[in-house]
Image (cartoon, rainbow, N blue to C red):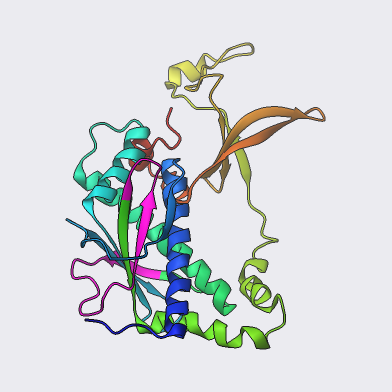
Amino acid sequence: MSLQPSASEATIRSRIGTSCADALRNSLTSLTGTDFQVKLHHGVDPEKPKDPIIWRQAFSVAEGALAWLATGRDLWETAGRMILGGAGADPVSDEDCRSTWQEIAVQTMSGIAQAASSQLGREILAERGEQDSAGPGDQNFNVCLEICDGTQTWHVHVAWSGALEDAFAVPAQQSEKLPAGTQETAASKTLDLLLDVALPVSVSFGKTTLHIREVLKLNTGSVVELDRLVSEPVEVIVNDCVIARGEVVVVDGNYGVRVLHLATRAERLRSGMSEAASRLGIGAK
């Protein structure tokens, strides 16, 4: 039986738990398109998740700074089918659902790293993430998160190492000594270095494949039919990566694109991979 945490430990635990809840909510909502509510679960802890996926993530803040996210089949299977099924993938296997949940876990851990960066006033990275069947070992799961989509409720267990907890504890002790805005300024230094980097931006209206004989027959007035309907949004591409979709507009006599949908992190990572793009509907034609 674990000892009750002190008041300061409870505050730190609540801070980390809230960061986890916010990160998981953002990941689920962005990937599924469903408005999920995620909050700290209070009261008696639910049963341990059945047939869980336990994701372990290391953070660059300190040696041994680790976090675990344990999710039962009831949630990882549901989320996987929502994402892949909504993209037209059929059938959806357990392995597909597991792989999809791992992407959600990666995004969640990245969100926790961003929260830690804001807390510490310096960049913290999520690194060396992997599935961990053993879990955190003798360490108890620190908090339980309650997830709800309006009709169903699930629970996710989160644990972290003492090194990660210590990292979150530092800002609470130093915050009164730092001028307002100091942490935000320090955290943005890395990004500031990249703000003036120029990137090529292009817009894709569609594509098609022609035989050489057909290309040689092209002349003035020829029409090449693309594999996209007029009603479908065009794709905004940066460095060969689809970052957004939108509709074509005219601005002062020039073509422009009104952004209607920003690609999620998963879509951006997979936009260059034809197999994953086919499964998730990224750039589907």
| Image position, residue 72 (x, y; %) | 24, 55
Quadrant assignment for the C terminus = top left
**Residue 55 horizontal side relative to residue 169, left or right:** left
Q: Determine if the magenta segment contains residue 134.
A: yes
**Residue 4 horizontal side relative to residue 113, left or right:** left
Q: Is residue 49 above or below residue 161?
A: above
Question: Which residues lie in the magenta part?
Answer: 127-153
Nearer to me, 116 or 36: 36
**Residue 205 horizontal side relative to residue 186, left or right:** left
Picture residue at 49% right of the left edge, 83% below the top: 169
- Residue 60 seen by the camera: no
Quadrant assignment for the N terminus = bottom left
Residue 67 found in image quarter: bottom left
Picture residue at 29% right of the left edge, 39% below the top: 81
Picture residue at 52% right of the left edge, 27% below the top: 206
| Image position, residue 37 (x, y; %) | 44, 51
Number of marks:
0
Q: Determine if the magenta segment contains residue 195.
A: no
Of all residues shown, which one is farthest toward the right? Answer: 252
Residue 88 found in image quarter: top left
| Image position, residue 78 (x, y; %) | 29, 43
| Image position, residue 76 (x, y; %) | 28, 50
Q: Is residue 221 above or below residue 241?
A: above
Picture residue at 47% right of the left edge, 63% below the top: 111
